[in-house]
Image (cartoon, rainbow, N blue to C red):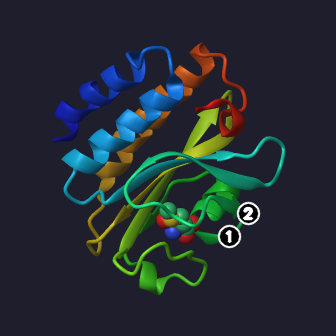
Amino acid sequence: MFNDLLPRIQDALENGGGNPGESLKKACEILQEEVPHYDWVGFYFRNGEKEELKLGPYAGDPTDHTVIPFGKGICGQVAVSNSNFVVPDVSAQDNYIACSIHVKSEIVIPIFVDGANIGQIDIDSHHVDPFSKDDEAFLEAICSRVSKLLVEAGISDPSSQLS
Ligand code: SME
């Protein structure tokens, strides 16, 4: 499944009509529609120089968590750890921000530009323990393509420049 999806995501990222925000939203929509265990898919980006994340393009139910301080929740922890975070069962996490009672698990993969952690892709699932190493490799590949798109589009602060 992931082998077939990666070229579609790449195409969405490269052919978004020159609007990187639209391209990222399209990528979220494809992921949410096509991967059965991806129920909410979104990007968070560092808010300028502030130690907080701001919600970017996403697909799924609207969330109240449009700003997340560094260190808070799964997303905020990835902002400081610079590492993938796979949570098979969110009920086992103390430092977790609940978005919906239906969410059972979560995966967050950081996005790097020139070695700096500038944001992340965040995926919620309604299934317990659905994520494998294949998900991580797939999402890492997407994150490096997102990084390339941002660099090529000259976007240095995605939190304010994506529309
Ligand atoms: N659960 C996340 C918050 C963001 S929502 O999943 C959209 C967290 O703990 O950081």
Graded by Cα atoms within 10 Å as few (under 14), some (14 to 19) or many (20 or more), the crowding at tag 2 reads: some
Horizontally, is 10 left or right of 130 in the view?
A: right
State which quarter of the image contains the N terminus. top left
The quadrant holding residue 131 is bottom left
127 lies above or below 131: below
Graded by Cα atoms within 10 Å as few (under 14), some (14 to 19) or many (20 or more), the crowding at tag 1 reads: some
Q: CA distance from mark 2 to mark 1?
A: 6 Å
Residue position marked by numbered label 1 in the rendering: 72
Amino acid at the residue labelled 1: Lys
Horizontally, is 46 left or right of 10 in the view?
A: right
Residue position marked by numbered label 2 in the rendering: 69
Question: What residue sits 58% from the left and 84% below the top?
Answer: 94
15 lies above or below 103: above
The percent position of residue 7, horizontal first and vertical second, equals 26, 25
Q: Secondary structure at mark 1?
A: loop
Beta carbon at label 1 within 8 Å of ligand 1: yes
Is residue 27 or residue 85 the one in the foreground?
27
129 lies above or below 45: below
The percent position of residue 71, horizontal first and vertical second, equals 71, 66
Beta carbon at label 2 within 8 Å of ligand 1: no
The percent position of residue 19, horizontal first and vertical second, equals 51, 21
The quadrant holding residue 142 is top left
Question: What residue sits 37% from the left and 56% below the top?
Answer: 60
Q: CB of mark 2 within 8 Å of CB of mark 1?
A: yes
Q: Secondary structure at mark 2?
A: strand
Question: What residue sits 28% from the left and 75% below the top?
Answer: 128
126 lies above or below 24: below
Question: What residue sits 72% from the left and 32% below the top?
Answer: 157
State which quarter of the image contains the C terminus. top right
Q: How many marks?
A: 2
